[in-house]
Amino acid sequence: MAKQKFSAQIISAGIYDGFDANSKALPKIKSFTRHVVAELDLEFGLIVNIKRAKGQQIHWCIEHPNLVDDEGLVMAPFEGDEYVADNDWNFYLGDCIWAPVDNKGGDWRMTIELADQLIVDETFDVEVDEYQVLNDDSFWLGRRKK
């Protein structure tokens, strides 16, 4: 008998209420979207359901839009591996916006591979709201009261 093939389906993609890596609970969706206006600590990503793949390994990757580290070097994509926990498994892949917000704009690509197949390939368009960046607390740091 031939082995049943796995299946994968995106359950939700967008902005989430936060992610706790120490919890088994997945974050809750707040807004279904692939267009994100950058805000400090805003969590976005996707939840994928994978069936009939228990024990197999997925490889996930988040490619950032040429973000630079403290030394001015372009950051490598975030990537890792996870084992599929059961035969009807939901997995969250996401990221959040960190300070400074003004350099986070661009396309953030999230991919997941399983058994040498690309099963998820989603791009989030992160927009930096120039007005909001100018009006955050850092705007007032160099100002004196009159």
Image (cartoon, helix red, strand yellow):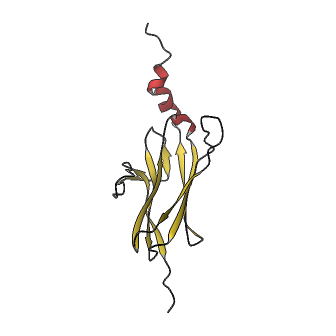
Q: Position of residue 20 (x, y in %)?
A: 37, 50
Q: Quadrant of the C terminus?
A: top left
The image quarter in which residue 48 lies? bottom left
Q: Position of residue 86 (x, y in %)?
A: 39, 72
| Viewer-closest of 78 and 35 | 78
Residue at 60% in and 71% down: 116
Say above or below: 123 vs 132. Answer: below
Q: Position of residue 109 (x, y in %)?
A: 57, 54
Q: Is residue 24 left or right of residue 102?
A: left
Residue at 36% in and 54% down: 27
Say above or below: 29 vs 72. Answer: below
In this view, which residue lies farthest toward the top?
Answer: 146
In this view, which residue lies farthest toward the bottom?
Answer: 1
Q: Is residue 56 visible?
A: yes
In this view, which residue lies farthest toward the right?
Answer: 73
Q: Is residue 121 visible?
A: no
Say above or below: 83 vs 130. Answer: below
The image quarter in which residue 111 lies? bottom right
| Viewer-closest of 37 and 45 | 45
Q: Position of residue 55 (x, y in %)?
A: 46, 73
Residue at 53% in and 33% down: 130
For the image shown, how many numbered marks are present on the structure? 0
Residue at 60% in and 38% down: 69
